[in-house]
Image (spheres, rainbow, N blue to C red):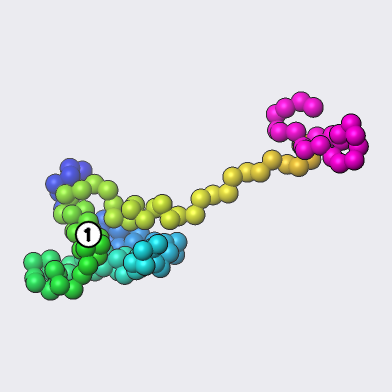
Amino acid sequence: MSATQDKSAEEIQAEIKALEACKAYAPKHNVFGDDNHRKLDLQVEALKGEIDTTTDEFEEDYNDDEKSAILEAIDWMEGQIEELPSSGWDHFKPKPDAPTPKVSALKHQECSCRRQPCPAPKPGRKS
């Protein structure tokens, strides 16, 4: 799809669902106190065509971060950018847990002084 083609109704609906799903893992507020969930709601409203960016109210009713979020959604919908608005929230997704080595696979030695155990050897090293 070219970067200048408007998105289909199906693509817009899918993105609305994706943005709504972001609320499950995006924190309510960022470190600056901005309301992330409000930005998500505004992006959804923009995709539904409920925000008019040509009025004075747009400049007065929204702060710079909110306007940026709204315009990002509109630019995507109009095909001006390829990156999905929801992908901007991906860094909040929980990371899958890394596998931990099995303790039984690690050999444990005692120090020659036998007063305290030696630290367990690192995986992959022979004792």
Image position, residue 12 (x, y; %): 25, 59
The reply, left or right, for residue 48 in relation to residue 23 is left
Q: Eyeballing the image, is 91 above or below 60?
A: above
Q: Quadrant of residue 93?
A: bottom left
Q: Quadrant of residue 59?
A: bottom left
Q: Residue at x 45, y 61 (%)?
A: 25
Task: Find the magenta span and give its range.
Answer: 107-127
At label 1, the amino acid type is Ser
Q: Residue at x 24, y 65 (%)?
A: 66
Q: Eyeballing the image, is 107 above or below 75?
A: above
Which of the image's four quarters has the C terminus? Answer: top right
Image position, residue 53 (x, y; %): 12, 66
Residue nearest the observer in this picture, 12 or 97: 97
Examine the structure image and report whether residue 110 is included in the region drawn in magenta: yes
The reply, left or right, for residue 10 in relation to residue 124 is left
Residue nearest the observer in this picture, 50 or 100: 100
Number of other residues with Cα within 10 Å of mark 1, as a class: few under 14, some 14 to 19, many 20 or more: some
Q: Residue at x 73, y 41 (%)?
A: 102
Which residue bears the numbered disc 1?
Answer: 68
The reply, left or right, for residue 33 in relation to residue 106 is left
The reply, left or right, for residue 39 in relation to residue 107 is left
Q: Eyeballing the image, is 22 above or below 124?
A: below
Q: Quadrant of residue 42?
A: bottom left
Q: Is residue 9 visible?
A: no
Q: Secondary structure at mark 1?
A: helix
Q: Number of callouts in the render?
A: 1
